[in-house]
Amino acid sequence: MDQTKNSNIHLKHCSQFCTLHTFIGIIFLLVCLTVLFPGCFAPVFSDLQSAKLVGPGNLEVTPSFSSVSFSSEGESEHVQNHLGIQAGLGVSSLMDFRLRYERLSVDQGDNESFGVNVLGFGPKFSLVKDWVAFYVPVGFAFGENIEVSETWQVHPTLLLTLPVSKYIEINPSAKVLIPITGEQDTLVAFNLGAGISTNLEKWAIRPELGFLINPGESGSYMHLSIGFTYYTK
């Protein structure tokens, strides 16, 4: 009984998206729940976008790859990889609507992994044209043995874009990951990305580094990501 209570407490530190379908996987999850390292995995917290809107009727598409690790008390361990794609459609001069899908491959030990699907969508509002935007995606996880109703989150995000030259822009962002359902903790993430291109109005390579923390706990997740954005303007 005590072990069950302990697992429920530490489940807050792991994503509710975690699901395993073998005995080895179940043991791995219990370790994850108990110590928060190294087996836990993170919700998607990269941004890979700028504060710019695409404009009415225009479309932006960004495929991406992310590698995520967890660090605590001087130790670090790889946790998961993501393959994703996101798109933004210009609704008006002040708002885009964005949709994102990520396929997570989560380390399970002994060269094993399991997959999780994550879908997010929501509006992006321009606060200061081309410089500051506010993005409010809502999302959930789905897959084998995942209770979708327990995974819903909203991620209010502040996006900034700082032009360096006609070829480079810097894109810092900050967000709060708020659970809508389930018993997850509220988390905080910070990202620092860039857009690199010979024509930032048409396409951009987007490297990004980010950190996810639980303000009430030690340890943090870090992602290294790369994306490629193409605009249909």
Image: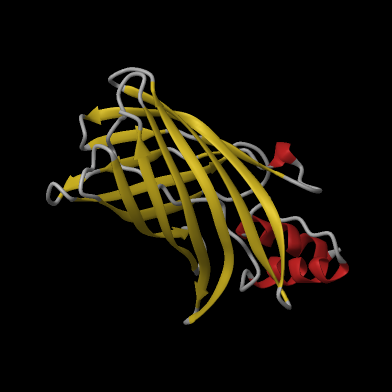
Residue extending farthest to the left is 165
Quadrant occupied by the N terminus: bottom right
Q: Give how far across and how far down residue 13 sits, in percent.
A: 61, 59
Compared with 61, 82 (above or below) is: below
Q: Nearer the viewer, residue 176 or 98?
A: 98
Residue extending farthest to the bottom is 74
Q: Quadrant of the rendered structure where residue 2 is?
A: bottom right
Q: Nearer the viewer, residue 230 or 148?
A: 230
Compared with 72, 103 (above or below) is: above
Q: Is residue 96 left or right of residue 162?
A: right
Q: From where the camera sits, is residue 190 visible?
A: yes
Q: Is residue 15 left or right of residue 187?
A: right
Report the residue at 63% width, 38% height from top.
Answer: 152
Q: Is residue 63 left or right of residue 20?
A: left
Here the colouring is: secondary structure
Q: Give how far across and how far down residue 118 sits, in percent.
A: 61, 44
Q: Give how far across and how far down residue 141 sits, in percent.
A: 66, 43
Q: From where the camera sits, is residue 214 visible?
A: no
Q: Give how far across and how far down residue 84 sits, in percent.
A: 53, 48
Q: How many marks?
A: 0
Q: Nearer the viewer, residue 232 or 83?
A: 232
Q: Nearer the viewer, residue 121 or 217?
A: 121
Quadrant occupied by the C terminus: top left
Report the residue at 33% width, 40% height from top.
Answer: 158
Report the residue at 79% width, 59% height from top.
Answer: 20
